[in-house]
Image (cartoon, rainbow, N blue to C red):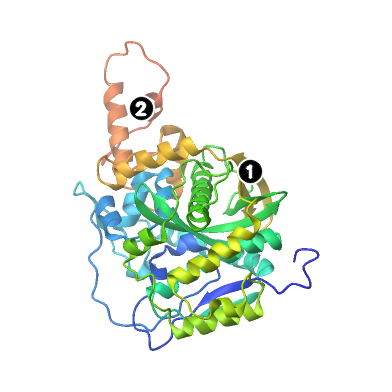
Amino acid sequence: MVRGARAMRPSPLWRVAEPARAQRTLLALNVAARERHTATTVRSRKTPRKPIEPPHSISDHVERKRVLSVTDLVSPSWCEYAYLYNILGQSHLPLWQRPASITTPDGNVLTPSWTQLQAREDTLARGTEIHDAMEREVQPIRLTFRLVSPADEWALYLLQFAAGIHAARTSGCAREVPVLGYVQGRLVRGIVDELRREGTSLLLSDTKTRRSSRLPTELDQLQARLQVMLYKRLVDSLYLGITGQESEAMDPYAEPVSLDTLGATLQLDMDAPLSSEFHADVQTMIQTTATPWKPSEASHLTLHTVLALARQALGRHNTQHVAHELELVYVQRDTAQPLGVARFHTEPTLLQDYLEHLFLLLHGRRAPEGVAAQSTRRCDSCAWREGCEWRDAQAKAALEKTRRPACDATVSDDVLWSEFDIPDHHLALLEW
């Protein structure tokens, strides 16, 4: 608890429950579970659904999604081939529901290592446990919200964002703050791990769990750094769209989020009344927790009135924005003991260049790229290592070059690749 905050009502720990009579699946379920890392849960009545044919490519996967997640945009930075294979292998499903093998766009059939897949699930589960414990330290009160319609769900999203910024400014810290914005014309959403007040700014921080007892190299931090850079851009985009208040601390590439554009993207009526259940739950939240609103201000809720509530909350402290400096906190996975902290400044141009190159892949305008030779240790924990098309192609190319006369040999990735023996099936004994 933040010192001096005893007299204040605690910030809420958000929980979502869909009423039994509501038949539809929440939009919240479309957010990657790995992205949320939050104690918020969704309960819904199970209804029989027609099996959906799995995507056949990255572009097919992206085209099917109305809303992308931050995970969708930063996962490829680790390995684009692993990203492709996980899409084809439907990694969002429980292990027992996933296909036994996948067929790549080039027609190759790959079988994953189920041991590695299970290890990844265990890692994610342990990471979620640690994040949940951290969230409860900051937000001990659990609230339940019944979401009857998509409009309810997106209204809650806006309220959570405004309440999170308010809590960080007034109480000193907020966790699991939802953000959204447009990136390269696509709506993207994510969950900021932590916002913490430091001086006149808010520090955006993300906690990462590691099996190793050492901090990752800067190269291996790239994915996490891109993630928090993108979070900052989305915070700035949503804040700018709600309040219209600009600041030098904002990402220059942040595009203001227009609620009307958001409504058109999600096909929502901005002026339709939100459900009576949602009204009641918002009233409970206002009366029992430290929110910036009064019950009378939330008597008639539509998406437009929710936007007004968010604008009211955010406009009260217009000097505090997310700082240029960002933070990654690393903890040991098994013990939850801290390993160290990496602080760095956001690099908007680096992020923009990465996103522009990435969207060529997402739109099917270029082929995926695998890891460089100096990062091949990433393959050790990959479930798709055996049969990986990138490894196969690189090893073949390196072997071919070693057969040519050495003219002006230089130390390069080709030399590193050529050091490997290529037995039957090219990669059966390949060591990285």
Q: Of the residues shown, which amino acid type is indicated by label 1?
A: Ala
> Which residue is pictured at 33% across the width and 39% down the height?
369
Q: Of the residues shown, which amino acid type is indicated by label 2?
A: Ser
Judge from the rendering whether residue 248 lies leftward or rightward of residue 262; answer left or right: right
The residue indicated by pointer 1 is 342
Up the image or down, 265 lies above or below 51; here it is above
SS label for mark 1: strand
Q: The C terminus is located in which quarter?
A: top left
> Which residue is pictured at 39% across the width and 24% down the height?
415
Residue 419, position as x, y percentages in the image: 39, 28
Q: Are marks 1 and 2 in contact (CB under 8 Å)?
A: no
Residue 234, position as x, y percentages in the image: 48, 52
> Which residue is pictured at 62% across the width and 47% down the height?
327
First reached walking from the N terminus: tag 1 or tag 2: 1
Up the image or down, 264 lies above or below 297; here it is above
Up the image or down, 405 lies above or below 418; here it is above
Q: The N terminus is located in which quarter?
A: bottom right
The residue indicated by pointer 2 is 418
Asked if residue 281 can be seen in this view, the reply is yes
Between the residue at mark 1 and the residue at mark 2, the CA separation in whole angstroms equals 35 Å
SS label for mark 2: helix
Residue 35, position as x, y percentages in the image: 47, 60
Asked if residue 131 can be seen in this view, the reply is no
Local crowd size for mark 1, using a 10 Å CA cut-off: few (<14), some (14–19), many (≥20):
some
Looking at the image, which residue sits at the far bottom? 21
Residue 58, position as x, y percentages in the image: 28, 51
Judge from the rendering whether residue 320 lies leftward or rightward of residue 373; answer left or right: right
